Image: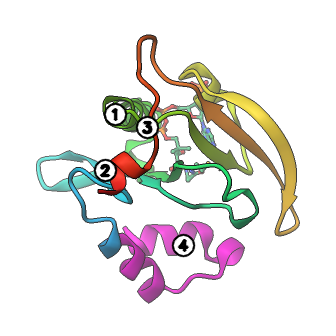
Amino acid sequence: MAKWFYDEWHTFDGRSIDQITAQLSDNLNRHSLPITFVAHENLEIMGTVSLDISDLPEFDCYSPWLSSLYVHEGHRGKGVASTLVSHLKHFACSGGVTPLYLWTPGSTSLYERLGWFEISRRSYRYKDITIMSYAGLHGCSVHSVAQLLR
Ligand SMILES: CC(C)(COP(=O)(O)OP(=O)(O)OC[C@H]1O[C@@H](n2cnc3c(N)ncnc32)[C@H](O)[C@@H]1OP(=O)(O)O)[C@@H](O)C(=O)NCCC(=O)NCCS
């Protein structure tokens, strides 16, 4: 996974494989943040997404963040990313941690289809990005991120 992230994003975020590996190790949690989820078929990882406390320094007033959504090339276009995002939303919602945030330099269609809406457009590291939010499921209680940090 670190190699996937490096190949996809290192020209943008400048992180080394070791830095990415260390960050992923911090995310090896089951019930608390930060946390990384994987979609897999038997032992093969098809894709991954994380729920992080911080992802965009300028917007640290918002938290938590959906980040590092990635589906391996051979598994794209089959709904894996949609399933991962839905799982993350349910995890956060069942822990009472909403709203959620994400930023993307690319298409917003996938997220919009899954109930996210645009809250801001910015320039970050010379790229135009869209910041989006997910308000929560109907009936979802809203508490603080501290609940999942315990
Ligand atoms: C974006 C990505 C996660 C989609 O994974 P996937 O499993 O093929 O997605 P799904 O099958 O669930 O849904 C496909 C949708 O993703 C959209 N999509 C494709 N590339 C995208 C991108 N870079 N950013 C956002 N959405 C994208 C498609 O338009 C499609 O939307 P539609 O059904 O409304 O047309 C995958 O292409 C990927 O890993 N790309 C490289 C990393 C990346 O760009 N991550 C997103 C960072 S914000």
- Give me the residue at 86% from left, 51% from top: 122
Quarter assignment of residue 57? bottom right
Magenta segment main secondary structure: helix
| Mark 1 or mark 4, earlier in chain | 4
Residue 126 forms part of the magenta stretch: no
Quadrant containing ligand 1 reads: top right
Crowdedness near tag 2: few (<14), some (14–19) or many (≥20) residues, C-alpha within 10 Å: some
Q: Amino acid at mark 1?
A: His
Left or right? Give the position of 107 relative to 40: right
- Give me the residue at 41% from left, 51% from top: 146
Q: Which residue is mark 4?
A: 7
Crowdedness near tag 1: few (<14), some (14–19) or many (≥20) residues, C-alpha within 10 Å: some
Q: Which residue is mark 2?
A: 37
Marks 4/2: CA distance?
20 Å
Q: Amino acid at mark 3?
A: Val
Left or right? Give the position of 61 relative to 41: right
| Mark 4 or mark 3, earlier in chain | 4
Circles 1, 2 touching at the beta carbon (< 8 Å) = yes
Marks 4/3: CA distance?
31 Å
**Residue extent of the magenta highlight:** 1-24
3 or 2: mark nearer the eye: 3
Crowdedness near tag 4: few (<14), some (14–19) or many (≥20) residues, C-alpha within 10 Å: few
Q: CB of residue at label 3: within 8 Å of ligand 1? A: no
Q: Nearer the viewer, residue 136 or 112?
A: 136
Q: Is residue 48 above or below residue 92?
A: below
Q: Secondary structure at mark 3?
A: loop
Circles 3, 2 touching at the beta carbon (< 8 Å) = no
Q: Secondary structure at mark 2?
A: strand
Q: Which mark is residue 87?
A: 1
Q: Which mark is residue 47?
A: none
Q: Which mark is residue 97?
A: 3
| Mark 4 or mark 2, earlier in chain | 4
